[in-house]
Amino acid sequence: MFRSLRRVLCAVAAALLIPLGAAGLQPAHAAAEAAGAGYWHTSGRQILDKSGQPVRIAGINWFGFETSNQVVHGLWSRDYKSMIDQMKSLGYNTLRIPFSDDIFKSGAVPDSIDFSSGKNADLQGLNSLGVLDRIVSYAGQDGLKVILDRHRPDSGGQSALWYTSAVPESTWIANLKALATRYQGQDTVVGIDLHNEPHDPACWGCGDTATDWRLAAQRAGNAVLGVNPDLLIFVEGVQTFNGVSGWWGGNLMGVAQYPVQLNVANRVVYSAHDYATSVAQQSWFSDPSFPANMPGIWDKYWGYIFKQNIAPVWVGEFGTTLQSTVDQKWLAALVAYLRPTSTYGADSFHWTFWSWNPNSGDTGGILKDDWQTVDTVKDGYLASVKAPGFPSSGDPGDPGDPGGGTAACTASYSVSSDWGSGFNAEVKVTNSGSTALSSWKVTWTWPGSQKVTSMWNASYTQTGSTVTATNASHNGAVPVGGSASFGFGGAPGGGGAPAVSCTAA
């Protein structure tokens, strides 16, 4: 009802806040070792790692396995490792990967992967699940965690309920258990999102086993935990509760009366979806008080779960084309509501933005249509809620492990747009040494009168015409051969790219 079929464009493209106080919460202080290691569990509204340190999911959706391509999109253009490296460099620490049950069918093979010039070489000959294995493995080596999202019963389209006549509940649960077993012991996969966007006639707490999503989530969640008790179980909302409707999957009002209860304690994370007018119109967008009314809307549908310390809340999807002023105000308000990491650390809402892909029809993505260039404006909105990455799950001999080598880096500067009175630019920092970087600093001097007006994914000082930029907390660690990027706006325009120097630590 509220969602256009965003993914319809995908196969075609391929073929061609509030300060909150709650007693007993663990503060997000800097720890001696990086947070995020091992499997995770919940405590009140926080997610904790194996050592009890709080973590924050600050990630991105990379879709495609749920479409007829049966693989993440964009591999027709780039190597999968370069994309994951770029996600990490931008400060995303978690990858949500949608899939459909079609990938479990015999003969399911990925479509539209480019193997020319050595791209995606280690994916040749693999079926869809084999490709997923490689993506999970490399994401873990890069320090990203993965949440697997059962998006659709089949690649044909979204379903209101978790089952269809062609894909019964028994198949849904069997395939969830197969995934839980497949990645048992691989703590890169921290959990499973049981079903994407249940909507009318799905209900919450009505007691009808054919339509009560809360009861179905309990059945499926217990089945998953029965084979892999370490996983988190992510449970989305429905569309309508007690006559009040919202976004598909975005209505968690029923949790207060009917919480999800699983056989393994401290495993439930509730997930909401929220969108802007580029997806569909909602009454609150035309409220005279917009956007000041939005925190109250979010409180009602899902924010109260966090505020009342019931459970962690993860906004698994939110996105917009950013074309309208309303959408720009909506995104700024939502990011503020999610709580800035610099102030609240991991005592915050969790999130994965929709989407990495540019070919999402009514939102676009972080990447532009060339599958290379970053939409720095859209990415910039998310800067305050990004969070540190997690320890690599790679082998001890992986490049980038501490080994007493030489720390070194290089930097490149490129102007992405120039309109005369101002410009936008991007700087890419590359680890050119023989050991991992823990931090970096870039310096340049403009020949003219340019001044930095804003910067994202780095902090800066400017003295005269000399600018010094240092990494943000989430992108200072760069493995050998890896890279990190930051962007900025400046004024006036007309300046060429100056020489830049990079200092590593």
Image (cartoon, rainbow, N blue to C red):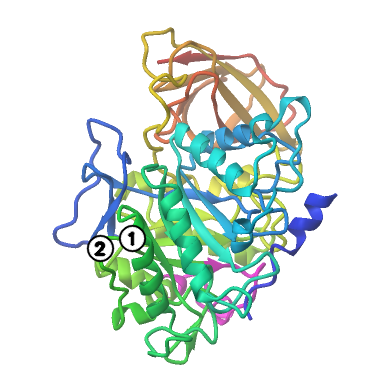
- Residue 80: which quarter of the image? top right
Does 376 sit above or below residue 320? above
Does 33 sit above or below residue 167? above
Q: Residue at x 71, y 35 (%)?
A: 78
Camera sees residue 331: yes
Q: Residue at x 45, y 28 (%)?
A: 471
Question: Which percent across, then down, holds residue 352?
Answer: 49, 54
Image quadrant in which the C terminus is located: top left
Residue placed most toward the observer, 149 or 487 = 149
The range drawn in magenta is 274-296
Which residue was labeled with disc 2?
264
Question: Which mark is first along the chain, 1 or 2?
Answer: 1
Residue placed most toward the observer, 311 or 19 = 311
Q: Is residue 479 left or right of residue 47?
A: right
Q: Amino acid at mark 1?
A: Leu
User: What is the tally of numbered marks visible in this picture?
Assistant: 2
Q: Amino acid at mark 2?
A: Val
